[in-house]
Image (spheres, rainbow, N blue to C red):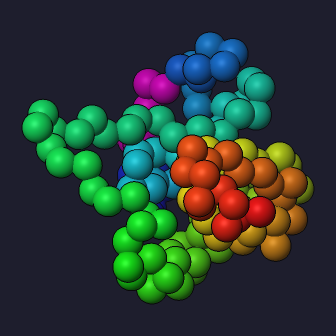
Amino acid sequence: MDSAAMDQAAGGVVCPLCGAGEAEPLGLSANGALVGCPGCTLTYCRALPAAPEGAAVAPYYGAAPDYEDYRRRKEAEWRELFGRLRRYVAGGRLLDVGCARGYSTAVARELGFAAYGVELSAADAAYAR
């Protein structure tokens, strides 16, 4: 992504932790703009898109029969994302909320983060342990 697109994605963001108003654009993900707060160093996703009214909820990742194929495809994206993030917060702490089977958490650990995951699915949390 070019710097102009990242700047536009981060525009008008107020940090949900400290209230600082000028977030630093880090990139875009499927869930929105990844931004960093220069005030408190929190890194967060700016805007999560709302599901359209009446949209069906997709099956949970771990229950999907092709989850392992999905994981292999996503691993390169996780490495690229955490690699970019590492430039700003090398060795920082990372909490993976909704970590499923913990694959992305493991990639973050490989790249030097003190990464932890939380997961509501008991089966996937057990798998991740």
- Asked if residue 29 can be seen in this view, the reply is yes
Q: Tally the marks.
A: 0
Residue 89 seen in this snapshot: no
Question: Residue placed at 60% from the left, 52% from the top?
Answer: 122
**Between residues 25 and 91, which one lies in front from this camera angle?**
91
User: Is 114 rendered above or below residue 101?
Assistant: above
In which quadrant of the rendered image does the N terminus lie? bottom left
Where is residue 67 drawn, in percent x and y? Answer: 45, 76
- Residue 80 sits in which quadrant? bottom right
Task: Specify whether 55 is left or right of 6.
Answer: left
The front one of 18 and 59 is: 59
Q: Position of residue 75 (x, y in %)?
A: 58, 78
For residue 98: magenta? no
Horizontal relation, residue 104 to residue 13: left or right: right
| Residue found at x 38% / y 71% | 64
Give the magenta range: 7-13
Say which residue appears at 39% left-offset and 58% top-offset: 60
